[in-house]
Image (cartoon, rainbow, N blue to C red):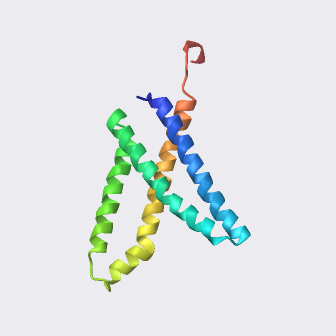
Amino acid sequence: MFSYPSFIRFDYRGQLVILVTIISFILISLMANFPSLAILGLMLIALFGLWQVISSLISVFSWQTSLRKIYLKALVFFFLLTFICANLDYYHPIRELYFEFIGGIFAIGLGIFYLSITIKEYNRVKNAPRSFWDL
């Protein structure tokens, strides 16, 4: 099993690679007028979210990190809210508003929140003293 610092480094680098790939696919598709790359970049957002969920589950069950517990609680709330809105009447105004605007903002906010947690923990692990002489 990973130690906590090596897990944080792996998580940070994995998220960074996926995020850079998403941004580059979308930018290349906008500059070269190649829309299938943009669709591929948008599909990679699902991989990015899946990476974050699996990473937070591993870190919560292995090391009991408190900020990632908050992320998981917000994620459960998001899925419950999505389930409730999906089961509303098709023409209900809350359903349209949620799926067109609020759901996307909430999902992007969760992704940014988790990325900020990972960056903060990575900087803390990177700057931690490694020996007596680093103190």
Where residue 91 sits: x, y (%)? 32, 86
In the figure, residue 23 lies in which quadrant? bottom right
Q: Where is residue 28 in the image (x, y as percent from the top left)?
A: 69, 63
Q: Name the residue: 53% across, 58% down.
A: 44
In the displayed structure, 90 sits above or below 123; it is: below
Residue in front for this viewpoint, 89 or 25: 25
Q: Quick one: which residue is furthest to the top in this view?
A: 132
Q: Is residue 16 left or right of residue 2?
A: right
Please name the residue shown 31% across and 83% down the image.
Answer: 90
Work out whether residue 130 or residue 85 is closer to the camera in this orientation and state it: 85
| Left-right relation of 121 to 60 | right
Q: How many labels does the image show?
A: 0
Which residue is situated farthest in the right direction here? 32
Q: Residue 126: which quarter of the image? A: top right
Rendered view: 69 above or below 6: below
Above or below, comparing residue 90 to residue 54 in the picture: below
In the rendered image, which quarter contains the C terminus?
top right
Q: Residue 59: x and y, percent?
A: 39, 38
Using residue 121 as the reference point, say whether residue 28 is left or right of it.
right
Residue toward you, 18 or 99 = 18
The answer to which of 50 and 114 lies nearer the viewer is: 50
The N terminus appears in which quarter of the rendering? top left
* Residue 66 in the image, given as x and y percentages of width and height: 36, 41
Residue at the spot 50% in from the left edge and 41% down from the top edge: 11
